[in-house]
Amino acid sequence: MSMKTLLAATALTSALAVPAFAQTEIEFWHAMGGSLGDTVNQIATDFNASQDEVQITPVFKGTYEEALTSGIAAFRAGEQPNILQVFDAGAATVIGARGAVVPVETLLTDAGADFDIEDYIAGVRYFYADADGTMIGMPFNSSTPVMYYNVEALETAGVTAPVTWEEFQTVTAPALAEAGYIPMTQSHMPWIFTENFFSRHNLQFATANNGYDGTDVTINMDSPELMAHWAAFKSWVDQGYAGFYGAAWGDNATPFEQGEVAMWLGSSGSFGGLQQTADFEFSATYLPYWEGVTSEPTQTFIGGAALFAMSGHSDEENAATAAFFEYLTSPEVQFMWHQQTGYVPVTEAAYELAKSEGHYEEFPAAEIGIQQLQLPAGEWTRGYRMGFYVQIRDVMNREYTRFLQGDVELEDAFATIKTEADELLARFAQTQGG
Amino acid sequence: MKRAAFNHRLLPVALLVPQIAIIAIFFYWPAWTAIQSSFYLEDPFGFGSTFVGTDNYTRLFASSEYLKVAQFTILFTVIITVFALGAALLLAVKADKVLRGARTYRTLLMWVYAIAPPVAGFIGVMLFDQNIGPMTDLFNWLGHDYRLGLNYMDTAFAMTITSIWIQIPVNFIFFLSGLQSIPQSVKEAAMIDNASPTRRFWETTFPLLAPTAFFLLIINITYALFDTFGVIDTIVYGNPASNPMTLVYKVFVDGFRGNDIGGSSAQSVVLMLLVLGLTIFQFRMLERRIHYT
Amino acid sequence: MTDTTLSMPVQVAPRGRRIRLSVIGDHFVLILGALFMMAPIYMTLTTASHENLTIHREGLQFLFGGELLNNFDAAMFGQGGFSGEITGMSMLKNSLILGMGFALGKIVLSMMAAYAIVYFRLRFATFAFWVIFTTLLLPLEVRIVPSYEVITGLGLANTYTGLIVPLLASATGTFFFRQYFLSIPEELVEAARIDGAGPVKFFIDILVPLSRTMIAAIFIVMFVYGWNQYLWPTLITTDEGLYTLVRGIKQIRQSLAESNQIPAYGQAMALSIIAILPPVLIVVFLQNWFIKGLVESDK
């Protein structure tokens, strides 16, 4: 990162660039729709303008699932793109298929770039890494669950944002309900109230080192702490301390944007959108934790997606991919991405740049996500790796919804999730030929 | 089969080859792949696989979720077929009958047909949205706390009504054409023979519509089973959770979305067998009775 | 419900109040039906005339706002994608090619196949029919990954051929034409044979003109089917010049589901209207034509 990226960030060279020799063309398949897609296109355009050896073409391939399946189908047909964006729940599928991707660490080192995993911010480092700590996928759009709140609502109720769930239960929620608000909603049950429940409390999520050590894994859905949390959440929903609008993200976010709900657990990446959709003053704070479970709450997992360099390409193309990755992780580009989308910057340098540019003085809430990712780490906070995780999340959503609607009992819901998830994990192990 | 047929050897073969070739490559070969895959658990990238015998099948039938999806699919298909055909027949009969404004009604009633299922689903989502949907407001006003995406029946309702909505026009078009092609002489003869309009309809008009009705029945069943995919996909969008879905959507969720190739292949095979049986049955039952005029 | 309301299927001439009441009843049913069919479209159009934020906060709109032209302009001419090649116009063109190509391909293939099955003494005619007919069973969504491998293997990814051909592997058209040919009086082919017409001449000079209303009906069905495809075009094309309208709309639906960005609702609604229009025109135009054809052939 040096002259090249500096020039890139300013994109001044574009007018002068005349390709002196054949350019290396690479393809980048992603799942960033709407304005996120526009930003991705902007980055690619700037990158192409910044140098004349590599020409990257981003291709929008639909949802995360569609992008992943397209990538897989293309790989089977020998037509895979150079870069494929894979979301958190699909990570195990890609990382499990060791021949399908070139680890980003290898890719960058082979291309002669400096790679130091310590350059990345703490919560991001190992989520897409293997058991040895080798980074496989390049963290790209990274976010983490945080709690947004309506400033005026909390003032009306005379409370501050809760730090712990105990505080929420006994102080915040009753006061907010009294003041005529639905105190809280959340937008993603598996991500916020399951995966990050484990990381926030530094609890083990799955056997075999949260799944990093192999495919012989079972999930700890019988964790008494988790079950207690869900029993509490259900009681909140029942007594009007929390709203529940189903498994869909937007259905739970909209009432917050409309001012009916006082606090909303969403993504740190929601910040940019909320600025447009919420016509009231809002702020954000860390994801609450249970004091009864831990007195030393830890950092959370990242969500979002990473970029994987797919194998089967020439060295020349791999070098071009590495050049794009280098460009992408440069502080300037990361800062621009952070500013425009609300996703966290993935490197320390980019975070420092954002700070020095005064970004967080203007928008303090934008810093919460990255701060939360830098809270003390624990044994179980680096990530998790489970196959067929898309379906496992589907099972969670299904059973949680039934439980919250009173269709099934707590024990039955969790027993079902555990049984089905363990079965899926065992089946995944078999797909790996083991 | 026609008795008066041409005797030719090469021509019919040449006529059939293009269709059969495309079907062989894009239907039978994928179907064969699915049958094979259904006995394996396979890494999606194609690196590893384990032969698991009939595990993928036994697992399906042991799954209460799968049976629930199957149950919903049957109910969903019956309701859509009955209502989309019933409403279209009613409207076609009326449109055939009225003298004033017939053309306008006809145009108004049929052009919704052109709407893509994802677009219809999108409109459905906007109408039934929990927070901003006018239909949700209507239900709440009527005293029902309508929750799309949360309550199973509420979601099923939105899916069904949206699916019926876009299917009525095509049925309408075909029924109306069928009605208008009944010769005036037949109608007049029926009038002399039979005084009751209801009986006249069922005894004279409807049998003449039978060929139309039969092929519409097949179209509607395949529509409900398969082509509602776009509607369902748009309504549950990425959150199958506890929402209702059809068997085809389940194949998509497990296979395309979840990359479980073996499991979803087994589902495809079950689906093929199920519908094959259904088709043979319905063909045998109905074709025998229908008179082609 | 059908039993009672279908009481007056054929125009009859009894006198007095009963007929007037029943005529009013007929109009009532038709108006109700038309409202049910039209209201969502109307709301799509009115909603297309508002700002995204208004729609995001308040949902569908019943009255027209002031953004109609802006939204349509953005939908039609706004350049999207990386290459800037995605505009309403280019998507419209691709959807048209997909719809037309699919419908024409389908009609040609399935008429030929149905003709062979119905009009020739073929030992394997029944078998061939079943070979084709069983393909009613499995939609493309289910066999999509193997189909992708074939198309990519043939080097047809990112081509119109690759978009259209796999969709042709289904039986609906052949089935329709078979049913229709079976309903054509047998005397016709006998008469043609006496006149000395061979199979090719019979097909082109007699059967095709005779089937024109059926062709029109099938063209409508198939055009709309091809026009409305989503999943297959998404998988098989990476070239932005090949995006279709339905894909453009789904992309906006996605931003609604996945992030807190305000989706471009107004544009999506405008795009929906644009996506509806061409098939509607085809339906309306061909409908008139084939109803007329039916009535004429009756005389």
Image (cartoon, helix red, strand yellow):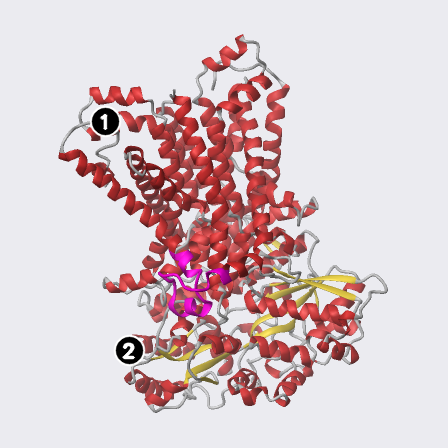
Magenta stretch: give its range.
C43-71
Residue A125, above or below B122: below
Q: Residues within 10 Å of mark 1 (few under 14, many from 20)?
A: many
> Which kind of residue does numbered mark 2 sit on?
Gln
Q: Is residue C69 located in the magenta-colored stretch of the structure?
A: yes
The secondary structure type at the circle numbered 2 is loop
The secondary structure type at the circle numbered 1 is helix
Q: Quick check: marks 2 and 1 in contact, CB under 8 Å?
A: no
Residue B2 in the image: state x and y as whole percent.
47, 17
Residue A253 left/right relative to A43: left
Using the rendered view, name the quadrant where residue A211 is placed: bottom right
Image disc number at residue B138: none
> Which residue, given by chain and number where applicable, does mark 2 sit on?
A239
Nearest the viewer among C111 and C90 is C90
Q: Chain of mark 1?
A: B
Residue C246 in the image: state x and y as whole percent.
52, 53
Q: Quadrant of the N terminus of chain A?
A: bottom right
> Which residue, given by chain and number where applicable, does mark 1 sit on?
B200
Residue C208 left/right relative to C6: right
Q: Residue at x 39, y 51 (%)?
A: B67
> Which kind of residue does numbered mark 1 sit on?
Arg
Nearest the viewer among B102 and B52 is B102
Which of pointers 2 and 1 indicates the residue nearer the eye? 1
Residue A228 in the image: state x and y as whole percent.
38, 79
Q: Is residue A148 located in the magenta-colored stretch of the structure?
A: no
Using the rendered view, name the quadrant where residue C247 is placed: bottom right
